[in-house]
Amino acid sequence: MPVLWRRIIIFAVSLIPLVWIIYKALANQLGADPAKTIVLFTGEWTIYFLFITLAVTPLRRLINFNHLHFRWLQIHRRMLGLFTLFYAILHVLAFLVFILGLDFSRFGKELVERPYILVTIPAVVLLIALGVTSTKAMMRKLGKNWLRVHKSIYLIAVLAWVHVFMQVRSSYLEAVLFGVILLALLLPRFYWAFRK
Amino acid sequence: MLIKKPSDIQSSEITPEAVYNARREFMRGAMSVAALGVGSLAAPGILAAPTNTADVDVKGPDWLKQQIATAGANKEKITEALTPYDHVTGYNNFYEYGYDKTDPADKAHVLKPHPWTVEIAGEVAKPGTFALEDLLKGIALEERIYRLRCVEAWSMVVPWVGFSLADLIKRAEPTSKAKYVAFTTLERPSEMPGQKSSFSTIDWPYREGLRMDEAMHPLTTLAVGLYGKVLPNQNGAPLRLVVPWKYGFKYIKSIVKIEFVEKQPKTTWSMIAPEEYGFYANVNPKVNHPRWSQAEERRLPSGLLRPNIIPTQLFNGYAEQVTHLYKDMDLRKFY
């Protein structure tokens, strides 16, 4: 399949969560507390896209048989990363608009008093930086440093997990599940880094 | 023991029943009109779903249905709009059924709340295990419309059907050693899937407690009904506590045991995170919670474009009735 087609398909599929939540909102099916529903939904999809983006390299390197391989996925990694940023921004906007009602005096207070929100600030700032430096022109400009800058995705992923873990209340299930997936995605990289 | 009469409401303040009912009818009408064309996006935040419960049928024994049907109106007044039935019964924290807000509504139908017995134990002259029907015999039920403030910073207005816990306590005849009341929820993993999860932070069964004077307060309610119907399973059938000036996690559901004790009992959330959840858990906008600001609340249903964010009131707006319970107490220390 031509690359362009694959791009269009991945782009369209990545928008399905957004279309779904807009449909639910318009159909009045978000329940009693739509603000919370949307914030949770966009937050969860940020993490899913982060995992998918981080899965590209291990999938390519570990699964490599005659017909079954993921080498084709590599050139789509940028788009997947940008969708991580996209859903992260929706998550932040949903929190600001629907939970805080755009009352920014409350935002400062929330940051100071709630460490689980505070840890997301460096993660979001870094994620935006990665988005801005994701173009080919920026890759050329940054040269060797580009890879160094983009390795901060691992820090972003850990901060995202801390953000989830700090909010554990009645169940560890989600935090444990995300932790296991994150470890599975990072461990091969540790292995490759130390083997060098 | 000495039982104080509720003296905080003068007879002149009591709304005549006819006026009360007329107002209720008007509000219901207004809500169904509002429900016709307004979705959650456009809703002004309070009137989004129908409150018409005429076609709602909650299963339950006939004696209970009859008793609920004859419930009178409580004298406590409230001018705020009721939270629609669908939201009161579809958006619940009841971890026995799972940790999503919709899990209780999806999964609680498996529970069989009838027949039901409640054990009355501890420092009382008349302990024993009683069938729910016997516990409710001779009790005049009332519709009690109270604000419900969850510690998660959302709130509702709920028309419960119930009676003062004090009525039941007086019958049990507590001894002078009874300083606290400890409540226990049913533990039945076969019908409560959340109790089977190995990732749960909760040490089942769910436990709650009140100080004796809090338990005797006329606002403290045991509810058996909702919106004039039998209490649905996801709302804590067949018997749940309602303490309107405290956060919702104090409202223990599906109660199987009421024990009178001398020492402050352990309560579930303060066992999990004592620095976050205290024994008293009084609604207080000035006492911060590490997870959520308690200064405001989202009154549900809260629309998206116009979030229904309102300031939280001290003791959830019941300060006049309950402040005397806590005089000389540091509410920051005893949160």
Image (cartoon, coloured by chain):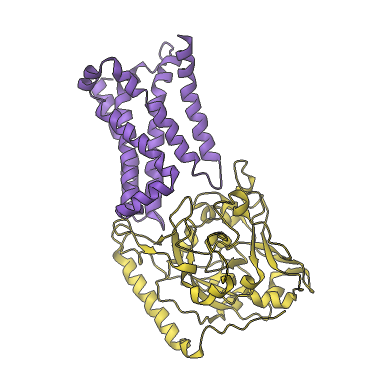
Chain colours: A purple, B yellow
Residue B59 occupies which quadrant of the picture?
bottom right
Residue visible at 30% across and 55% down in the picture: A103
Q: Nearer the viewer, residue A27 or A86?
A: A86
User: Is B54 above or below relative to A67?
Assistant: below
Q: Quick one: B319 or B246, which is closer to the camera? A: B319
Residue placed furthest toward the bottom: B12
x and y percent of residue B318 in the render?
Answer: 49, 73
Vertically, is A135 above or below B29? above
Which quadrant: the N terminus of chain B? bottom right
Q: Is residue A105 visible?
A: yes
Camera-nearest residue between B192 and B275: B275
What x and y, as percent, mark residue A162? 47, 37
Which residue, as the protein is rendered here, is positioned at the far top?
A196
Q: Is B335 placed left or right of A34 in the picture?
A: right
Residue B62 visible in the picture: no
Q: Is residue B230 left or right of residue A5?
A: right
Front residue of A153/B112: it is A153
Q: Position of residue A123 (x, y in %)?
A: 37, 34
Q: Is residue B176 left or right of residue B79?
A: right
**Residue beneath the point at 68% across and 66% down:** B181
Identify the residue at horizontal 39%, vertical 50% (top origin). A110
Quarter of the image where the C terminus of chain B is located: bottom right
Q: Quadrant of residue A52?
A: top left
Q: Is residue B10 above or below residue A123?
A: below
| Furthest residue in direction left, as rendered | A137
Q: Quadrant of residue A146?
A: top left
How many marks can you see?
Answer: 0
